[in-house]
Structures are given as structure tokens and as C-alpha cells.
Image (cartoon, rainbow, N blue to C red):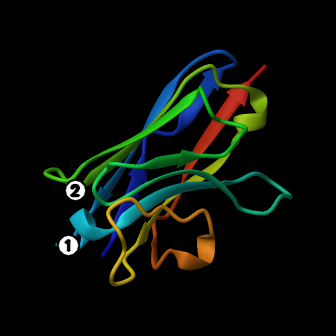
């Protein structure tokens, strides 16, 4: 599985961006997916995750109500709609796939160690 994240850029505070994560291979539709981010000098943190069925989502408290994760299994693509951005959202955003066997239809992990495949990251910069 190869993951390609895109959609990052420079935006003013209060603005919006939509990130995409395109996956190659046939395993996407059975993979739980997640978005993580890493700001300069900080550890990588979980942002949002979605079960392989799309039937369950989970968000970090810091983005709840502002970000929306979704997926289109027919297009092998995951999205992260980010609204009301603040400078604290500035980071490199990574998409990741959790393809461990036997995942339940509603399972989402917040732990980076559970994700098997990672994209290259896309920079999001929010100016004040």
C-alpha cells in the first residue's frame, strides 16, 4: 500500500483546507485510516481516524467540531476537511493505514504504532 497525501498549503487563521490521501493497492477498503500531524519541535499526534467501513470516526479534542474525516472506498481516497484553522494547527499532516487482520467494522485506533503504512506528509501552515 502506498499513500499520497495532498492539499496542504498556507491559509489565514479562520480559513479552511481539505486534505486528501490517495491509496494504491486493493487493501484500502479494509484498512482503518487516520490522520496524524507533527509540528516543529513536537511529537507526532493523532488528529482523526475512520473505520474501514466509514461507520465510525474519532477525533482529537483539539480538532473536534472543526475537522471532518471521510473516505471514499470506491476512489481509494480519504479526506480531512479542516475548518476554522488556527496557527496551532500548523504542522506536517500524515495519513496512515491500519491494515491489521480482523479489524472490526467500527474499529479506529488513535495509536500511531497500530498503523502499518504512512504517507509522505503535507505541510499545513496557518498564519495569524
Q: Residue furthest top?
A: 14
Tell me if residue 65 comes above or below residue 111 in the rendering: above
Tell me if residue 50 comes above or below residue 11 in the rendering: below
Residue 27 at x, y percent in the picture: 23, 73
Residue at image location 33% in from the left, 48% down from the top = 55
Q: Residue furthest left?
A: 74
Residue at image location 65% in from the left, 35% down from the top = 63
Label ID, residue 53:
none
Tell me if residue 93 comes above or below residue 110 in the rendering: above
Say which residue label 1 marks: 25
Rate crowding at label 1 as few (under 14), some (14 to 19) or many (20 or more) other CA atoms within 10 Å. few
Residue 72 at x, y percent in the picture: 23, 46
Say which residue label 2 marks: 76
Rate crowding at label 2 as few (under 14), some (14 to 19) or many (20 or more) other CA atoms within 10 Å. some
| Cβ atoms at labels 2 and 1 below 8 Å apart | yes
Q: Is residue 22 left or right of residue 86?
A: left
Residue 44 at x, y percent in the picture: 71, 62
Question: Quick one: SS at disc 1?
Answer: loop
Residue at image location 61% in from the left, 39% down from the top = 124
Amino acid at each position: 500500500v502506498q499513500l499520497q497525501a495532498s492539499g496542504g498549503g498556507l491559509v489565514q487563521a479562520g480559513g479552511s483546507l481539505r486534505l486528501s490521501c490517495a491509496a494504491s493497492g486493493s487493501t484500502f477498503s479494509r484498512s482503518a485510516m487516520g490522520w496524524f500531524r507533527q509540528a516543529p519541535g513536537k511529537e507526532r499526534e493523532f488528529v482523526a481516524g475512520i473505520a474501514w467501513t466509514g461507520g465510525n470516526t474519532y477525533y482529537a479534542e483539539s480538532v473536534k467540531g472543526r475537522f471532518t474525516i471521510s473516505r471514499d472506498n470506491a476512489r481509494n481516497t480519504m479526506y480531512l476537511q479542516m475548518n476554522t484553522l488556527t496557527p496551532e494547527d500548523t504542522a506536517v499532516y500524515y495519513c496512515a493505514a491500519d491494515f491489521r487482520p480482523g479489524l472490526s467494522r467500527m474499529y479506529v485506533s488513535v495509536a500511531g504504532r497500530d498503523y502499518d503504512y504512512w504517507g509522505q506528509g503535507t505541510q499545513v501552515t496557518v498564519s495569524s
